[in-house]
Image (cartoon, rainbow, N blue to C red):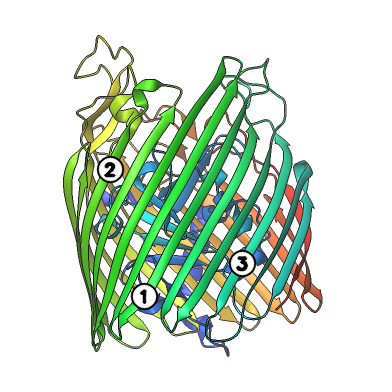
Amino acid sequence: MISSIYRPAGTARRPLAMALAVAASTSAFGQAVQTKKLEPVVVTATRTPQIAGEVLSDNVVITSEEIAQSGQVSLVDMLQARRGIEISRNGGPGTNSSVFIRGTANNQNIVLVDGVRVGSATTGGASWAAIPLSQIDHVEIVYGPLSSLYGADAMGGVVQIFTRKGEGKPAPAISAGVGSYNTRNLEAGISGATAGERKFRYALNAAHETSDGFSATKAGAFGFNPDKDGYTSDNASGQFSLELAKDQEIGLSLLHNHLNAQFDNSRIFDDRNVQTLDTIALHAKNRITSSWLSTVQLSQSDDKLASITASGRNFFDTRQTGLSWQNDVSIGKDVLQMVLERREEKADTSNAAVNRTRTTNSVAAAYQLRRGAHLATASVRNDDSSQTGATTTGSLAYGYRMTNALRANASLGTSFRAPTFNELFFPGYGIASNRPEKGRDMEAGLYHDDGKSQFSAVYYHNRITDLLVTAFPCPVDPATHQFGCAYNVNKALLSGVTFGASTTLGNYLMHGSLDLQDPHDETTGRQLARRARHHGTVGVDYHAGSVRAGSELVFASRRYDDAANRNVLGGYTLVNLHASYDFAPDWSLFGRWDNVFDKKYELVRNYATAGSSLFIGVRYAMK
């Protein structure tokens, strides 16, 4: 029952109360603020730029300023401190990682890099460890079902990563840092744009990161090896666009990362994953008439993984090729959107049975309506897969602005997840007749933003049917699936309330988030693995002149490491600090101290997490 999510667990009780206090104090503190923040623009929620205050989908934007000031070196760690998100990781940075959005699994969410879809067709979901934070300008997180806009797998949300773009005069940038576990980082880039009618925008960035790390496993884990498990990452990104004429643009974007990361699989071998992530996209934006904007994009992403262990080398490669044509037609204040897409997924692995190709042809339409205090969106999409047939999804959302600062929202939406190639074809596990998972979500929320203080409270109820789980014994062919098989047998209910708040008082910014959720398997009644009932953050940032400093508290209640709920992962509370100092024009020192009190905790049973660790650096960025 949903009422059960409101009982705080012991470890999380104190930070839970602090998060509620931050939320409750928002309006009072907001009266002291003298400055107004510039409202961000969100693209992912509707596939068109929208002011955040008019976006009906629940969302969070991580700005370029937040990334720079945080001192973080890992995208996964950056996401851990955002509401609605939990993570798991098999060791330190560079090891296998998962991101859960509102209780959904890693393969029930979509990740885009500059509009290019990334992920593995064999295991499903994005390879988070291979996405370099050093190449990211900003991140948009949109919660809730978005299959009616993006197709398969958008059951819990969509995370879109934007690399840096060029504008203005040439602006070089360079930074270097060192930290605990012999972590080193070096970044360099340049961006800008030419003047005149045919403007050429450019941005080039490259980075090298390396760390000795710590042992990924702990005593008791399979393949425990007390050696250090570090990583090396060499990555780069580029954005180029040329304005052929007014409102006529062509462009190219690309991202590359080569990650060599150690992990533990035996005591006698230096096990490692060598992973390459590449994305490339060509686009043409053309304003056909004053009210009609056409965007064509041709894209390709490669997710290549070679796992090298004592037993040999196995490889798991996925190539996704996409072609989309999006048309946005303005009708007064409204927007009609029509989309045609084709996506091909191709797997090439060391297991020939999984080497397949799947194509999906899609057609979608959406409408955004604005009538005074009333906002509404409607969308519908049909995805026709060469493997699983056609699936139609839709969504409907309505918002009413009660005052200039306060808005109420309600929405309904459906979604689906296509079975992975492993769930369909892997010998002894996959079943070729497996069907897509289906989701049906209802949400209601309140949003307050007066330009000085922000507060949001959203209730969601997301029921997933035909849930693909490991069924034992296998209902289809137990003789050839002796250890169980992937099968559409269960259903899950992901329900909860998510709160977010921020406000300023003088030179201080206070912010917090709180998620009270009940993600459980309705067939077994058990809590979904590695999801907490309660998690959140509390933070205070300070800014005066050339000095910035901040502290954050990240907490989660206990979780279970397995679907049977036998192995408990204890709750945890982490305290992190960060600061920066502008010691000269365009120059700054920055630093971060994570896990200040050296909390011992696990995100995956018998896998280690970082202890108290420091990272400091210097940055030059022409403004």
* Residue 609: image location, x then y, percent: 62, 39
Sequence-wise, the earlier of marks 2 and 3 is 3
Mark 2 → mark 1, Cα distance in angstroms: 27 Å
Indicate which disc residue 359 carries: 2
Q: Amino acid at mark 3?
A: Ala
Q: Which residue is mark 3?
A: 203
**In this view of the protein, can residue 11 be seen by the observer?**
no
Mark 3: give few (<14), some (14-19) or many (20+) Cα within 10 Å. Answer: many
The quarter of the picture where the C terminus appears is: bottom right
600 in relation to 63, above or below: above
Q: Residue at x 43, y 49 (%)?
A: 300
Sequence-wise, the earlier of marks 2 and 1 is 1
* Residue 219: image location, x then y, percent: 63, 22
Query: Tags 2 and 1 in contact by the CB under 8 Å rule?
Result: no
Q: Callout 3: helix, strand or loop? A: strand
Q: Nearer the viewer, mark 2 or mark 1?
A: 1
Mark 2 → mark 3, Cα distance in angstroms: 33 Å
Q: Callout 2: helix, strand or loop? A: strand
In the rendered view, does 368 fall on the left or right side of 238?
left
